[in-house]
Amino acid sequence: MGGQPLLQSKSFTLGKLSGTVYDFKNVGDELERHNHGESDVHISIVARGKLKIVGDGWVKEASAGAVLDWDVGVFHAFIALEPNTRLVNIVKG
């Protein structure tokens, strides 16, 4: 493998919905640890592939079809466990 991670993102707006699509090209590509406030807290949908999700004191795996509903202030990071994984975040606020 080696080289730079190839995490790609694209923001979208569909009427009142907005969010970001993340494509993790390689295993190990990461969306770094972050959290959200009232205006940008989101749900996450694993559209394809598999992710490891890491928070403060917890780790879980999520495969295609998984939906995660985040609360305000919860730190989380996403790490690709399969190539060509796609994550869709939809803002709730």
Image (spheres, rainbow, N blue to C red):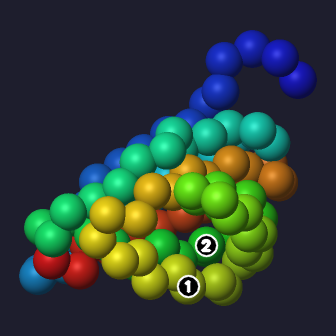
- Residue 13 is at least partly visible in this image: no
Query: Circle 1 sits on which residue?
Result: 67
Mark 1 element type? strand
Is residue 9 left or right of 53 when viewed as pictured?
left
User: What percent of the width, then of the height, locates residue 52?
Assistant: 73, 59
Instruction: Say which quadrant the N terminus sits in.
Output: top right
Crowd tier of the residue under label 1, counting other residues whose Cα lies within 10 Å: few below 14, some 14–19, many 20 or above: some
Identify the residue shown where x is 51% and y is 57%: 76
Residue 63 in which image quadrant: bottom right
Mark 2 element type? strand
Query: Circle 2 sits on which residue?
Result: 46
Is residue 3 left or right of 78 when viewed as pictured?
right
**Position above or below: 19 against 70:** above
- Residue 39 is at least partly visible in this image: yes
Crowd tier of the residue under label 2, counting other residues whose Cα lies within 10 Å: few below 14, some 14–19, many 20 or above: many
Identify the residue shown where x is 76% and y is 69%: 61
Residue 42 in which image quadrant: bottom left
User: What percent of the width, then of the height, locates residue 8?
Assistant: 50, 40
Identify the residue shown where x is 55% and y is 63%: 87
Residues 2 and 32: in front is: 32
User: What percent of the width, then of the height, locates residue 5?
Assistant: 65, 27
Instruction: Say which quadrant the C terminus sits in.
Output: bottom left
Is residue 73 left or right of 57 when viewed as pictured?
left
Report the amino acid beneath label 1.
Val
User: What percent of the width, then of the height, locates residue 81?
Assistant: 81, 53
Report the amino acid beneath label 2.
Val
Identify the residue shown where x is 65% and y is 59%: 57
